[in-house]
Each structure stands twice: as C-alpha cells, then as structure tokens.
Image: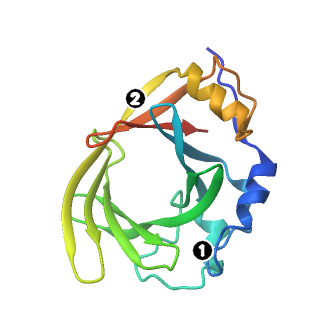
Amino acid sequence: MEKLQVDFNKNLLNKLKTSIPDGIPYLEWFKCWRGHARFNGELLTHLYFVISVEDIIHHLKFNYKYLYRGDERSVILKFDYVDNQYIFTNILIESKLIDKNDNIYEYRFDADLKLDTKYLVERDKEPFYTKLEEYDDKNIIKVNEQYFSHTPKQFKKLSKILIEKKILKNIDEETNFKYITSSDKDDIYLIIT
C-alpha cells in the first residue's frame, strides 16, 4: 500500500497561532510535519502539533534546564477542542537527561509554563509512553497511565470529522492511520504524518 502524505491545513495552523500565549513560539508552523488528533468516541477533543526542537529552541521565553538540544527531539503544542474553538493548553518537551536504563522523559507545561505532568518515553517498547506524575501547586500525584501504539487501520467516521473540520488535507475516509490508545481512557489518538 502506498503511503499518502497527510498534511495539516495551513489555514487551520494560521488560525491557531492567535491562541498561543506570549512566550510560546509558533514561528516554524509550516514545518509542522506530524501530530495527533485525539478523539473520545466520535468527539474530537484535542490536536497536538509536533515541531522540531531546532526550529523552536532558541525562541522559547523560558529556560527549562532539562531541555534537549539535538537530533530528532521535538516540542509538542497541545490544543483542546471545545465548542468549535481551539484553545492552547500545553507545551510538551523531551528532556536531554537519560537515566541508567536509557529512558527519556517528557515534561508537560501549562499555558503559563508551569510544570504539570511527567512522562516516561520508551520508543522501542510497549507501552512506549507512560504518564508517571502530575503536579499541582503543592503535591506530586503518582499515576501510571500507559499508552500503546497500533498498526494502521481505517477510521472512516473519524476521518470524515477531520475532513469536515478542515484539519487535514490529502485525506479521505479510506485513509489508514497508525493510532495510540491509553490504558485509562477510551480515547484514540490518530497519528498524523
């Protein structure tokens, strides 16, 4: 099967720029080469945009001490989809620190750049991604939500939503998506590459 190049709609990317707070860069939007669309049942709930660190690193208005500065690492911008509006909620950044087991960690910050979640990333294993800790003003909450990747398949109803909302171009209802599921939620994350 020939791989179809699926891209984000540039009009959508331009619209989303207006909801990103000061201090969160968006300058290399058109190099946004992958991401995720998250659904709960047939309801679109979130969009995630993966942006190369090299495009974004020198423009962050905060200096997170563990920020990775090389090769394929990335920054993810997360938007909630509520009442037909996209709301910027988080930036996720992989750490440059690798532990004795070669594990990589990812940190999620809220729109005010406060750390709110820590994830373990194990790229060649299943689960490949695990939520470890959530933070509030006074506490560290231990969690163990695991994420699993799956081989491509068609999601005709979800593809139709992506088409109708003009999120992607070069897509039809027959498009196959790799996807991610969580151990704690019924959500499906369609991988956009």
Question: Is 90 placed above or below 158 here?
Answer: below
Q: Which residue does the image show at 75% across and 50% down from the upper left?
A: 12
Tell me: 26 left or right of 82: right
Numbered mark located on residue 57 in the image? 1
Question: Is 144 placed above or below 171 here?
Answer: below
Tell me: 119 left or right of 92: left
Numbered mark located on residue 150 in the image? 2
The residue closer to the viewer here, 141 or 40, is 40
The residue closer to the viewer here, 161 or 151, is 161
Q: Which residue does the image show at 62% across and 27% down from the upper left?
A: 159
| Mark in the foreground, 1 or 2 | 2
Rendered image coloring scheme:
rainbow
Residue 188 coordinates in the image, percent (x, y): 43, 36
Figure label count:
2
Q: At numbered mark 2, what does the secondary structure look like: helix, strand or loop? A: strand
Residue 129 coordinates in the image, percent (x, y): 33, 49
How crowded pointer 1 is (Cα within 10 Å; few <14, some 14-19, many 20+) is rated as some
The residue closer to the viewer here, 40 or 67, is 40
What's the residue type where badge 1 is placed? Ile
How crowded pointer 2 is (Cα within 10 Å; few <14, some 14-19, many 20+) is rated as few
The residue closer to the viewer here, 85 or 140, is 85
Counting residues from the N terminus, which is met first, the one under dot 1 or under dot 2?
Answer: 1
Work out which quarter of the rendered image holds the N terminus and state it. Answer: top right
Distance in Å between CA atoms under marks 1 and 2: 31 Å
Q: At numbered mark 1, what does the secondary structure look like: helix, strand or loop? A: helix
Which quarter of the picture shows residue 78? bottom right
